[in-house]
Amino acid sequence: MEKKSQIDLFGAAALTSFALLLAFNQVVIKVTNGGLQPVFFAGLRSAGAVLCIFVWLKWRGIPLHFVKGTRLAGFAIGCVFAFEFLCLFVALDLTTVSRASVIFYSMPVWLAIIAHFVLPDDRVTPLKALGLGLALGGVAIAILTRDDSAGSFWGDLAAVGAAIGWAVTALLAKASSLSRVRPEIQLMWQVGVSAPILLIAAFFFGPFIRDLEPIHIAGLAFQIVVVVSAGFIFWLWLLSIYPASGVASFSFLSPVLAVGLGWLLLGEDVGPSLIAALILVAIGILLINRPPRSRRTSV
């Protein structure tokens, strides 16, 4: 498919479907945590993804080659990836899908803040500053307002850690030497390095197996094959066709859909404060990802 200058009907449908997949992913993690210790689960997911991505590379005839000069960055991004998903899986074990998703999908906020200081061509504009303020206000509301059914405060903080880890991962992929390598190789670094780190860290988080049932095995397989492998490759394909700013603007849908699925599938309580937090985060993400208006020149 040829490159597009704007999001068309197919692109909108595909990006909405991907946002729905990411939202459903949070529910799957929450349910699968019932049978597998969260950090052990995350480690198994990364290990399984290594095999899936290796098969994909062989099928497409892409050599598994780690370019000289990228190994330090590759190890760094793998370590941050491990931290991100350790935090996310623990967050979804300790708090609700709705709350964790609102906080986790504030990632563009942390990315914009970090990029302002480390990327000279990615400064915070007045519009971005407004978006940052709104989104951070939403995250604060989500963390500070809670009732007995809201889950653990530590779970909310773990979700913040996961969002910051996601932002650093994205920044490393964009601004380090890894920007010179194929996205599939970037992903292989992330899952390949994170798998042993997470599996070793799992020894400090209790028994590996909880009340394991077939649904938990299905959840693990879904994570490995659909989310980490096929889902990421599909995202990269969309990103190669449509403008990055347009693709990023659909990220606000994931927390909205995740809150809805948490309520619909898990019976989670969605009160006025969480809805207010969700609206602020969604609007903030839209403003942060809004491309600057191009100036018209007269001829």
Image: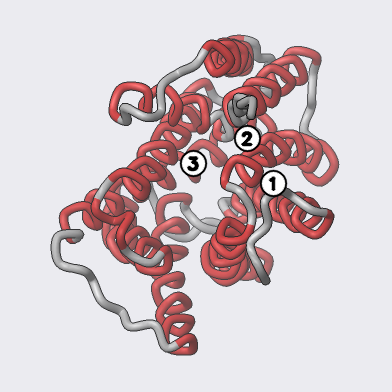
Mark 3 vs mark 1: give the one in front: 1
Kind of residue at disc 3:
Leu
* Residue 230 in the image, given as x and y percentages of width and height: 58, 69
Q: Is there any visible trace of residue 202 in the rendered image?
A: yes
Q: Is there any visible trace of residue 199 in the rendered image?
A: no
**Could you tell which of marks 1 and 2 lies nearer the N-terminus?**
1
Residue pointed to by mark 1: 23
**Could you tell which of marks 3 and 2 lies nearer the N-terminus?**
3
Image quarter of residue 171: top left
Foreground residue among 71 and 41: 71
Residue pointed to by mark 3: 88
**Any mark on residue 229, and which?**
none
Indicate the secondary structure of the residue bearing disc 1: helix
**Could you tell which of marks 3 and 1 lies nearer the N-terminus?**
1
Q: Is residue 165 left or right of residue 203?
A: right
Foreground residue among 125 and 160: 125
Question: From mark 3 to mark 1, how far is it between C-alphas?
Answer: 13 Å
Kind of residue at disc 2:
Ser
CB atoms at circles 3 and 1 under 8 Å apart? Answer: no
Q: Is residue 145 left or right of residue 122?
A: right
Residue at 64% across, 25% down:
298
